[in-house]
Each structure stands twice: as structure tokens, then as C-alpha cells.
Amino acid sequence: MKKLILRWKRSLWGREDGQGMTEYVIVVALVAIAAIGVITAFGDNVRNLFATSTEALAGKASSTSGARTVDDSLRQSRDLNDFAAEARKRR
């Protein structure tokens, strides 16, 4: 009987079955808290950045980014010779 009680105590105190899962849950909770903090701090900036990028890709002028609409002079076809000549002009 005494051996049975000792074995039962060892099995209760010596178990580590849920340790890995508990550590995983703690790490996931910390990552979630960090993500919420980052989104709270930088959410508006990221939203404005994507809005500006979307407007620029659509060809619309944006007052926040300085992007301009595409006109015909910017649509000229260029090859490497034209590119080099244009680069020399801008120096």
C-alpha cells in the first residue's frame, strides 16, 4: 500500500505532459499582445501608406505623397540610348 501511494505521488509531481502546450500558449499570447500594440501604434500610418500607394498605382495625384498624374511626355518610349542621354541631361 505504501508503494502504491509513493508511486501515485511521483506520478503527480513528475508529470510534464502539458508543459510544452502551456509554453506554446504563452508565446502565442505574447505575440498577439505585441501585434495589437504595433497595430495600435502604427495602424493609421500603414493605412495612409497603402492608400497613397493605391492612388499612385491608379495614376491619381496625391497631395500626401507628391505623386503626379501621368501625362503624354512621361509615356514616351525609351531605349538604353535615350535613357543614357536623359541621365546625362539631369546631372
Image (cartoon, rainbow, N blue to C red):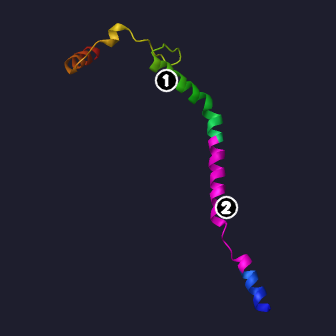
Residue that lies at the very extreme toward the left in this rendered image = 81
Write the start and end of the magenta stretch as one range: 11-35
| Residue 83 place in picture, x, y as percent | 24, 19
What is the C-alpha distance between the residues marked 2 and 1? 42 Å
In this rendering, would 46 be left or right of 4?
left
Circles 2, 1 touching at the beta carbon (< 8 Å) = no
Which residue does the image show at 25% across and 14% down from the upper left? 89
* Dot 2 amino acid type: Thr
In this view, 18 is above or below 13: above
| Residue 15 place in picture, x, y as percent | 68, 74
Which residue does the image show at 50% across and 18% down from the upper left? 55
Q: Is residue 13 magenta?
A: yes
Q: Earlier in the sequence, mark 2 or mark 1?
A: 2
Which residue does the image show at 61% across and 32% down from the upper left? 43
Residue that lies at the very extreme toward the right in this rendered image = 1
Which residue does the image show at 76% across and 86% down from the upper left? 6
Q: For numbered disc 1, what is the local secondary structure?
A: helix
In this view, 17 is above or below 51: below
Q: For numbered disc 2, what is the local secondary structure?
A: helix
In this view, 18 is above or below 52: below
Residue pointed to by mark 1: 53
Residue nearest the viewer, comparing 21 with 89: 21
Residue that lies at the very extreme toward the top in this rendered image = 72
| Residue 13 place in picture, x, y as percent | 72, 76
Residue pointed to by mark 2: 22
